[in-house]
Image (spheres, rainbow, N blue to C red):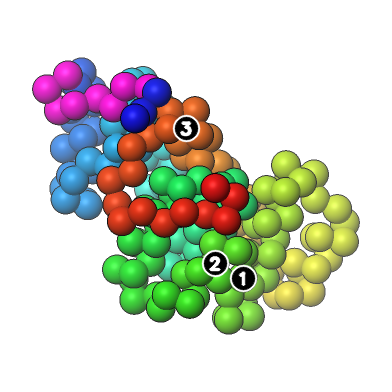
Amino acid sequence: MSRLKQITDQDASPAATELFAAIKSKVGMTPNLYRVVANQPAALKALLGLNENLAEGEFDAATRDAIALTAAGANGCDYCASAHTAISKSLKVDGAEIEARLLGKSADTDLQAILTFAVAVIEKRGFVSDDDLKAARDAGLNDGQIVETIANVVANIFTNYINHVAHTDIDFPVVLTKAA
């Protein structure tokens, strides 16, 4: 049971109601994560805006979702592992690749470079070494892709930590991380 209130449609403020409508129009439902964040509509608006803006970056939906899976696995967030597994399946990613992404791995060498750097950012709390940056660049990442990786990691740390604090009720087929 969630330790923070999951705002219902009936209890939503006018600002949250408007944001819920936008979410439902895109995904057909309002996931419990967003219902928790709606306790502060400004935070929900910021989270949604960050994700919408990142969707305008170079990384496609599958790459952004791979980073989300990697962050969920590294941070032990079962809610995000569950949500992003469902999203990955809708993007036609096979099960073995989804499991690998939860561990920061990919069969795709270009994606592996991104996920390796994402893991370094998460594990080192941003204090990556010169060697980490060199490895990312040697693997083909440019500075824009490095920044975009960090931005996606940060967006996912936000949701991972909200779920850790709240114990958000998982409203997707449950996937447990290795950290659980």
Q: Earlier in the sequence, mark 1 or mark 3?
A: 1
Neighbourhood count class around disc 2 (C-alpha, 10 Å): few under 14, some 14–19, many 20 upward = many
Q: Amino acid at mark 2?
A: Arg
Q: Is residue 87 left or right of residue 120?
A: left
Q: Position of residue 36 (x, y in %)?
A: 34, 29
Report the magenta residues as a range. 4-11
Residue assigned mark 1: 105
Q: Is residue 59 left or right of residue 4?
A: right
- Pick whichever, 175 or 152, lies toward us: 175
For mark 2, give the secondary structure.
helix
Q: CA distance from mark 1 to mark 3?
A: 25 Å
Neighbourhood count class around disc 3 (C-alpha, 10 Å): few under 14, some 14–19, many 20 upward = some
Q: Amino acid at mark 1?
A: Lys
Q: Which residue is rendered at x = 29% and y = 52% of the image?
A: 172
Q: CA distance from mark 3 to mark 2?
A: 21 Å
Q: Amino acid at mark 3?
A: Ile
- Pick whichever, 74 or 137, lies toward us: 74
Asked if the residues shown at circle 2 and circle 1 are in contact, with their CB atoms under 8 angstroms apart, the answer is yes
Q: Is residue 89 left or right of residue 21?
A: right
- Pick whichever, 173 or 11, lies toward us: 173
Residue assigned mark 2: 101
**Picture disc at residue 162:** 3
For mark 1, give the secondary structure.
loop
Q: Is residue 61 above or below residue 121?
A: below
Q: Is residue 2 above or below residue 139?
A: above
